[in-house]
Image (tube, helix red, strand yellow):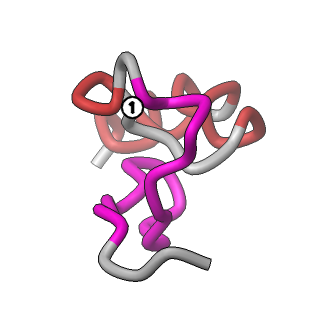
Amino acid sequence: MPANLPSKICEVCGLSFNWRKKWKKNWDDVKYCSEKCRKNKKSISSDAQKI
């Protein structure tokens, strides 16, 4: 496994995730660690507005 891969923090769950080859062309636009978090983004943002 290659070392020194870039990583980000998921905007939904807050966990760290590493660069993947499938994100090579759009790494700057990746915000979520998984499809599950991407689908749950709406519920998280609406919860934040209630506070």
Q: Position of residue 7 (x, y in %)?
A: 33, 64
Q: At x 31% / y 77%, what residue is drawn?
A: 4
Q: Nearer the viewer, residue 24 or 13?
A: 24
Question: Residues in magenta?
Answer: 5-24
Residue occupying the far left of the picture? 28
Q: Which residue is mark 1?
A: 30
The answer to which quarter of the image holds residue 30 is top left
Q: How many marks?
A: 1
Above or below, 47 relative to 38: below
Which x, y percent locates residue 3?
41, 82
**What residue is shown at x 76% (from left), y 39% (from top)?**
36
Q: Secondary structure at mark 1?
A: loop
41 versus 5 height, above or below: above
Crowding at dot 1, Cα within 10 Å, few <14 / some 14-19 / many 20+, comes out as some
Residue 32's spot in the image, x, y percent?
A: 50, 41
**Quadrant that contains the N terminus:** bottom right
- Magenta segment includes 20: yes
Q: Is residue 32 above or below residue 18?
A: above
Residue at x 57%, y 50% (from the top left corner): 33
Position of residue 48 relative to residue 17, above or below, is above
With 22 as the anchor, is 25 left or right in this view? left
Mark 1: amino acid: Val
Q: Position of residue 49 (x, y in %)?
A: 29, 33
